[in-house]
Amino acid sequence: MSFWGQMNLMDAASPLQSEMFLFHDHAMVLLLGIFTFCATLGLKLMLNTFTSRTILEAQRLETIWTVIPAFLLIWLALPSLRLLYLLDEQSNSGIVLKSTGHQWYWSYEIPLSNNGSFDSYMVPENELNEGDYRLLEVDNRAVVPFGMETTVITTSADVLHAWTLPSMGIKMDAVPGRLNSMSMFVEKPGVYYGQCSEICGANHSFMPIVVEAVDLEDFCSLEF
């Protein structure tokens, strides 16, 4: 999860988020190069005193500053399209986590489980235990196995919500009357935090998302 004063993105816990990190670094190289070039050019223009009253056009220069940005855009677009296709891939995993957004809590259901659905409410500040995170802890966590593909399905029972788990690289709209799905592969055990990322009313800030990744044996003993 993120911490106060953190300068970079939070640690990745899935291959998709790792790919997003690589694309972020790839884009930053391009942006820093453009910024450095433009800043150097602007500084030189302000400091030099060279002028010319005879040069009216420079077709070669115009060709260069048209072609080079086009190549830079292609250099940025190709990895971006690859990442978009990776995000759209759906696994054939039999483990499904269904999440339903409400005002202002989440309901979870694992179809293979016999325990039915359960609600996940934020823990009030006066009920937090030592070491718990304010505005992020819930009374019932969604449990998934790590090292396996899990299909996450979202919908909403009232207004628009967004099921977001930054460490997994997932941000998915929960739309009333519609099912959206994404694949999630948790690489390591742990507790991962997120929040609703769609303004959904007065208590939008008070419906956190907590997913706990456990071993497959522990998952089977908990859920089945």
Image: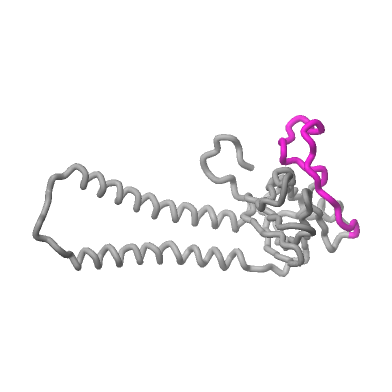
Give how far across and how far down residue 39 sits, in percent: 30, 47
Point out the image quarter for the C terminus: bottom right
Numbered circles on residues, count: 0
Tell which residue pokes out farthest to the left in this image: 54
Please report the bounds of the magenta region as a residue range. 114-140
Q: Where does residue 153 sit, x and y in percent of width and height?
A: 74, 62
Q: Nearer the viewer, residue 125 or 141?
A: 125
At x 74%, y 49%, the residue is: 211
Residue 17's spot in the image, x, y percent? Answer: 59, 54
Q: Residue at x 68, y 59 (%)?
A: 173
Q: Is residue 92 above or below residue 122?
A: below
The furthest residue to the right: 114
Quarter-of-image position of residue 4: top right
Q: Residue furthest front?
A: 202
Residue 157 placed where, x, y %? Answer: 79, 59
Q: Is residue 63 left or right of residue 223?
A: left
User: Is residue 74 covered in magenta?
Assistant: no
